Amino acid sequence: MATGRINWLNRLAAVTVWALSASAGAANLEAGTVPSKDDLPKTLKGHVMTLASDIGERSVERGRGLDRARAYVIDVLDKAGLHVREQTYTYKGRPAQREVANIIATLPDYTELTPPYLVGAHYDTVWGTPGADDNASGVAVLLELAKRAVVDPLPVPVTFVAFTLEEPPSFGTDHQGSRVFVRNLRDKGQEVAGAIVLEMVGMTKPDQEYPLALRLAGYPNRGDFIGVVGNSNSKVFGKRVVAGMRQNPALPVETLYVWLNGWLLPDTRLSDHASFWDVGIPALMVTDTAYFRNPNYHNPGDRPETLDYRFMAELVDSLDRALRSLP
């Protein structure tokens, strides 16, 4: 969550580096299979361990972590049987120019006749954090939703997108991955029926904080729910998604819909969903509420062992139900 390349040789290098560093836990992830309910927490943890422990920091500003994460996400989606392509562009910033990419995955039977729904999550981090909750947790849930959609096809078209460069210094600029994605949509005259953006979805706590404006709004005082945030234009879409999610009684869901695209409550704009809001596309942020729950936000403490993988597994189940209930 924000505050406030390849030629074939590069690809080969990125995949090789990831393969040499992958943990034994991640090696046991069978990309083309869907884990059982009991095994799903372990599988989600394997994804998070690879991204946040084996790879670690995934900042565009230094190191090769961003490229290694890119290779990992592509590998999992490809082995699961999705059609994967990269939307590459050049990041022009410090310390130098480099090629970056959004990763776009469609299901085997996808056609462009009907505007798809979208499930997205960013895979980069800021400096100095392994980014387990922010946002390896979101990527892990996206990967498992995509794998389920291949094994048990969805009744509606869904595109899965791993966004690059959500974090500073790119957030809110033309280099932000979701802004590049949305701009490309508009340039091609393409549409999205609605976007679900996963932003920090792995933390639970006995207590819960809120922005000042929401402290008297009657929200729970325990941090054991998942939040769904939309703007006024997303309310109809949000109600459909939340109704599907609530078919899973094991995961409490709380909602917030804001006016004026969230500008009156800026905390609600700090992820890739805002890129869709700003061009009139319905979009939801699904979140554990980020720094209102997680004390490790954007610091070295955001590590895999701090997350609740059963909570994340319930979210996979809830979102899978939601996608299957959409018209």
Image (tube, rainbow, N blue to C red):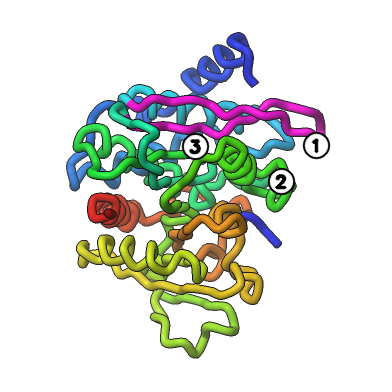
Q: Which mark is residue 170?
A: 2
Which portion, as a residue range, is magenta?
82-107
The answer to whether one can see residue 57 in this image is: no
Query: Going by the picture, which residue comes out furthest to the top?
Result: 9
Could you tell me which residue is drawn at 46 percent across and 87 percent down?
217
Q: Earlier in the sequence, mark 3 or mark 2?
A: 3
Label 2 amino acid? Ser
Q: Earlier in the sequence, mark 1 or mark 2?
A: 1
Q: Is residue 101 magenta?
A: yes
Q: Which residue is mark 3?
A: 51
The vertical placement of 163 against 234, above or below, is above
The vertical placement of 177 against 283, above or below, is above
Does residue 249 appear to the left or right of 297 in the view shown? left
Is there CB contact under 8 Å for labels 1 and 2?
yes
- Point out the frontmost of discs 3 and 2: 2
Q: Which residue is mark 1?
A: 93
